[in-house]
Image (tube, rainbow, N blue to C red):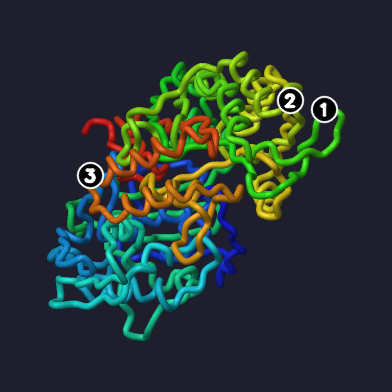
């Protein structure tokens, strides 16, 4: 969901898993697609952790009741249809012709098992899937292909929540452990591809599921090579060692195009932004120009507004991201469900910003340390350098301090920063509004990424009311109004929505980039089709 996740290492019962399912894994060169991915698959358990590393690759094997298409709209998956029977009850009709890779039919009992496993069996570290099923009171089957879900209260977004839950095959012996799955004993789903083998941190191999309910998949085999270095992914694509490479740096696009590599991209369903600590009276690294600590300046909305006015967001998108980014005015790219059409990005106005800062009591500005990760997101450290130059023009001396992501995340968690570079993504803009801007509330599960302690009760009320409306235009409009209300207070400074860039060679005709950042063979169309 979000940019901070606290994971302990997964303990694998086997470092290398090799398993062949039925058919011989011997595709021809024309049938197999090879993908260089930045994603290092951490487990074969599809319900262990809500990370793109897992959900992206394991979506070939396992499926959800509902999935989100490239426009972020909910579409039928293993659920052929669904409807609301009452404010607290939903009915899901399941597909009749779906089967697991072992040949057994998919039924309502598999749905019950899967949700029960997430709710009551798995105990993963923070960032698991519990949040998506916490509102579910009970799951029952009225017949083998009908599931009735009862919720604790009115939950209009239940279908969207279920778009994050993979369905596993019910086991008579009870719940499978993560270690059992990592050993390759029963990696069986209903998806378009079957598990073949896995070398942890290196290679995942899949073979086509010829009996897939939606028709025979395009590729007879898929090989994912984990290539964490962007330069190495670009090199593998250039030499033809792979057919597809994800997360291509913008700086390499022109060179790749000159060598005949095709590029596809889309704006990510996320934003990266600057966040302030407004909760503490004094902050680390915030001083006057003589180096003397001063009261927290970010509590004054005029200061936040001045800094926002002095931030050249178009420059970040056009120069640092080399056009593969969009200047941001809100948490998701304009046009996505729930976003506002009224907010826009303006060019910086340094003179007005400086005058506003003086009215707030800082005619000479102040000093601040800006924290951030190094290389976690496109343009992260470069963006901080650019922002520091912008703010210097109104008297605010910002010192960017970047660190490896794990170090940065730990420092942020311990309150070592006064202002910092952050990010959020999710299956809907409300996920980020709740996590980043809503008041921290453990009971309502809001404010999980609100490290700065920002609180606006009027906004909380607007967002809460909007989230009681069923998914659709009315809900989207209410969420947009809440966004229009909160963003002028500058609780954060949205910087940009970076673009997800994927390159592919001649054997791939086209690739549809998903705004969630997933990398799958299903998004690739072979040349000649």
Give the Cα separation between the discs numbered 2 and 3.
44 Å
Mark number displayed over residue 474: 3
How many numbered discs sit on the rendered protein?
3
Among the 4 quarters of the image, the one containing residue 396: top right
Compared across the picture, whether 25 is left or right of 275 comes to left
Mark nearest the camera among 2 and 3 is 2
Residue under the image location 34 percent in, 65 percent down: 21
Residue located 21% across and 65% down the image? 87
Q: Is residue 268 above or below residue 170?
A: above
Disc 2 marks which residue?
365
Q: Earlier in the sequence, mark 1 or mark 2?
A: 1
Q: Name the residue that disc number 1 marks.
A: 289
Q: Residue at x 32, y 84 (%)?
A: 172
- Asked if one can make out residue 243 in the rendered structure from this viewpoint, the answer is no
Residue 394 placement, left or right of 498 = right
**Farthest residue in the top direction?**
351
Query: Closer to the N terminus: mark 3 or mark 1?
Result: 1
Residue placed most toward the observer, 316 or 479: 479
Residue 55 location, x and y as percent? 41, 55
Whether residues under marks 1 and 2 lie with C-beta atoms below 8 angstroms apart, the answer is yes
Left or right of 469, for residue 94: left
- In terms of secondary structure, where does tag 3 sit? helix
Which circle's residue, 2 or 3, is located before the other in the chain?
2
Query: Secondary structure beneath disc 2?
Result: loop
Badge 1 element: loop
From mark 1 to mark 2, how far is it between C-alphas?
Answer: 7 Å
Q: Tell me the quarter of the picture where residue 336 sits.
A: top left
C-alpha distance separating marks 3 and 1: 50 Å
User: Residue shown at 46%/76% (left/top)?
Assistant: 177
């Amino acid at each position: 969901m979000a940019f901070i996740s606290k994971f302990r290492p997964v303990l694998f019962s086997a470092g290398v898993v090799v398993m062949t399912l039925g058919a011989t894994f011997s595709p021809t060169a024309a049938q197999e697609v090879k993908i260089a991915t930045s994603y290092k698959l951490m487990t074969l358990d599809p319900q262990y952790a809500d990370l793109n590393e897992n959900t992206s690759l394991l979506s070939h094997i396992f499926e959800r009741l509902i999935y989100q298409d490239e426009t972020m709209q909910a579409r039928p998956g293993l659920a052929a249809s669904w409807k609301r029977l009452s404010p607290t009850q939903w009915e899901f009709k399941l597909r009749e012709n779906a089967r697991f890779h072992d040949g057994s039919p998919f039924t309502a009992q598999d749905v019950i098992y899967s949700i029960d496993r997430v709710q009551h069996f798995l105990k993963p570290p923070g960032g698991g899937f519990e949040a998506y099923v916490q509102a579910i009171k009970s799951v029952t089957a009225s017949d083998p292909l009908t599931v009735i879900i009862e919720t604790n209260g009115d939950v209009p977004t239940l279908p969207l929540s279920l778009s994050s839950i993979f369905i596993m095959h019910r086991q008579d012996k009870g719940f499978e452990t993560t270690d059992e799955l990592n050993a390759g004993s029963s990696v069986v789903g209903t998806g378009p591809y079957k598990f073949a083998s896995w070398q942890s941190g290196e290679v995942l191999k899949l073979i086509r599921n010829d009996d897939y309910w939606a028709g025979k998949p395009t590729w007879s085999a898929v090989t994912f090579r984990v290539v964490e270095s962007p330069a190495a992914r670009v090199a593998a694509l250039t030499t033809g060692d792979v057919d597809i490479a994800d997360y291509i740096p913008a700086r390499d696009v022109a060179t790749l195009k000159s060598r005949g590599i095709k590029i596809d991209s889309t704006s990510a369903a996320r934003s990266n932004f600057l966040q302030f600590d407004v909760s503490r009276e004094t902050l680390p690294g915030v001083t006057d120009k003589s180096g003397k600590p001063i009261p927290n300046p970010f509590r004054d909305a005029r200061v936040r507004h001045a800094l926002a006015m002095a931030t050249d967001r178009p420059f970040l998108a056009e120069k640092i991201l080399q056009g593969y980014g969009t200047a941001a005015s809100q948490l998701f790219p304009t046009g996505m469900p729930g976003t506002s059409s009224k907010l826009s990005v303006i060019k910086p106005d340094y003179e007005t910003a400086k005058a506003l800062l003086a009215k707030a009591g800082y005619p000479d500005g102040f000093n601040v340390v800006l924290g951030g990760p190094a290389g976690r997101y496109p343009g992260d450290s470069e963006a901080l350098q650019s922002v520091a130059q912008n703010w210097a023009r109104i008297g605010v001396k910002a010192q960017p301090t970047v660190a490896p992501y794990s170090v940065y995340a730990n420092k942020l968690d311990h309150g070592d920063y006064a202002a910092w570079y952050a990010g959020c993504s999710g299956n809907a803009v409300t996920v980020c509004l709740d996590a980043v801007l809503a008041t921290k509330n453990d009971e309502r599960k809001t404010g999980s990424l609100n490290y700065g302690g920002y609180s606006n009760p009027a906004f909380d009320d607007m967002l809460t009311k909007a989230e009681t409306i069923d998914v659709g235009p009315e809900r989207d409009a209410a969420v947009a109004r809440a966004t229009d209300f909160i963003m002028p207070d500058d609780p954060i400074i949205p910087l940009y929505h970076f673009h997800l860039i994927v390159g592919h060679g001649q054997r791939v005709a086209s690739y549809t980039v998903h705004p969630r950042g997933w990398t799958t063979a299903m998004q690739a169309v072979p040349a000649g089709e």
